[in-house]
Amino acid sequence: SDDELKERVAKVKASLGERLYMPGHHYQKNEVIQFTDERGDSLQLARQAADQTEAAYIVFCGVHFMAETADILTTEKQRVFLPDHRAGCSMADMADLKQTERAWEKLSQWFGPTVLPLTYVNSTAAIKAFCGKRGGATLTSSNAGRMLEWAFEQKERILFLPDQHLGRNTAYELGIGLDEMAVWDPMKEELVHERPLEDIRIILWKGHCSVHEKFTTEQIKNVRSDERDRRIIVHPECTWDVVQQADESGSTKKIIDTIQAAPANSKWAVGTEMNLVNRLAEEHPHLSIHSLNPAMCPCLTMNRIDLAHLAWCLDHIAAGTPEPQHEIQVPKQVQTEALQALERMLAQA
Ligand code: CIZ
Ligand code: SF4
């Protein structure tokens, strides 16, 4: 039963004390979030993981790439666990290393040494290493603008992995025209562009988030026609059209900060993951908050971390027999190169 599971989790937390650290992403379910030591977006969680020098066990309540980042940023002695190894991220899986190497070869033929690779942190450690090795960096939705500016100080062009929407929305905000952006399709191995190659400033990898891509301009139209005074705020992983038509857009942190500062009784339609939207509504009863998508949209892989998996993972750690399938260990060479990409970001923003 739930009560029994809760007791098991609480017991392990009490017995391991400071030796256990449990970060939780904002998209996690309440049943998990209630036990986490800290909540955050991926940037905050990455930073906090790096500060956890005392914890021997880091049990990451989030998805695979976040646990990999925690492993990269913590010391060798600290062990990182993900309570369900199937908690991946469909966006991160849209860019694998082989595909990226093939794309890079083509881009190098066309553009020579003028391209710098950048990757959203929502990517595998191998992709972060790919970027780190070539002078590039990681970025998050909170610092994407700053990181693009930084990248353009180094090179004329950017290869932006793996989310085309975050790349397009951020570049557009910096004044880059849609026709100066090309899209690399890793399936067809083809570059889609309007203007001649020499005019291309950013090459967007054709990946997306299956949660945020489900917000549509149709939903925006419906909100506008029902309630003119409901403000619409969306995450920049949404498509360009949706971001353009919304009242505001921004990272997970910006969405939370905006809601926290919102005037009493104001109304909001929020275009981001469902667990976070529901929690914002619960925590701000003086506001009217609902999802922009009436059909709701959980991140299925985030939701794989549930109370039962958490209890199972923690029980094994407390017994001194952690499940190998839960442990996240990024290979040494990949760690070193991925760390370069992460450190370039952490130094900037
Ligand atoms: O979509 C995600 O996984 C996001 C927004 C992560 C984060 O916290 O930046
Ligand atoms: Fe990946 Fe989207 Fe889920 Fe974030 S919300 S973990 S980008 S699938």
Image (spheres, grey):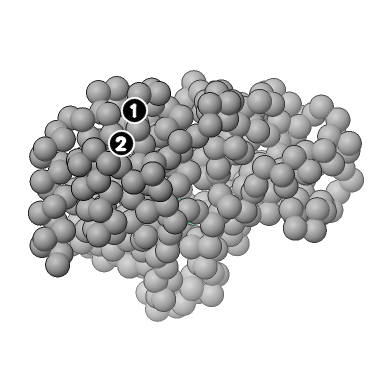
x, y percentage for residue 85?
A: 42, 52
Q: On the picture, is 348 further left or further right than 268?
A: right
Q: Residue at x 80, y 58 (%)?
A: 188
**Residue 50 vertical placement versus 106 (above, below):** above
Q: On the picture, is 80 further left or further right than 335?
A: left
Q: Nearer the viewer, residue 168 or 127?
A: 127
Q: On the picture, is 217 further left or further right than 151?
A: left
Q: Residue at x 64, y 32 (%)?
A: 131
**Residue 20 vertical placement versus 153 (above, below):** below
Q: Residue at x 72, y 47 (%)?
A: 99
Q: Is residue 1 visible?
A: yes
Q: Which residue is mark 2?
A: 58
Q: Is residue 255 visible?
A: no
x, y percentage for residue 224?
A: 45, 72
**Counting other residues with Cα less than 10 Å from the Cα at mark 1, is it few (<14), some (14-19), or many (20 or more)?**
some
Label count reads: 2
Q: CA distance from mark 2 to mark 1?
A: 7 Å
Q: Quadrant of residue 279?
A: bottom left
Q: Residue at x 28, y 63 (%)?
A: 278
Q: Secondary structure at mark 1?
A: loop
x, y percentage for residue 285?
A: 18, 62
Q: Nearer the viewer, residue 115 or 250?
A: 115
The quadrant of the image that shows the N terminus is bottom left
x, y percentage for residue 152?
A: 68, 28
Contact, CB < 8 Å: mark 2 with mark 1? yes
Q: On the picture, is 102 further left or further right than 207?
A: right
Residue type, mark 2 in image:
Ile
Residue type, mark 1 in image:
Gln
Q: Secondary structure at mark 2?
A: strand
**Counting other residues with Cα less than 10 Å from the Cα at mark 2, is it few (<14), some (14-19), or many (20 or more)?**
many
Marking on residue 78: 1
For marks 2 and 1, the one nearer the N-term is: 2
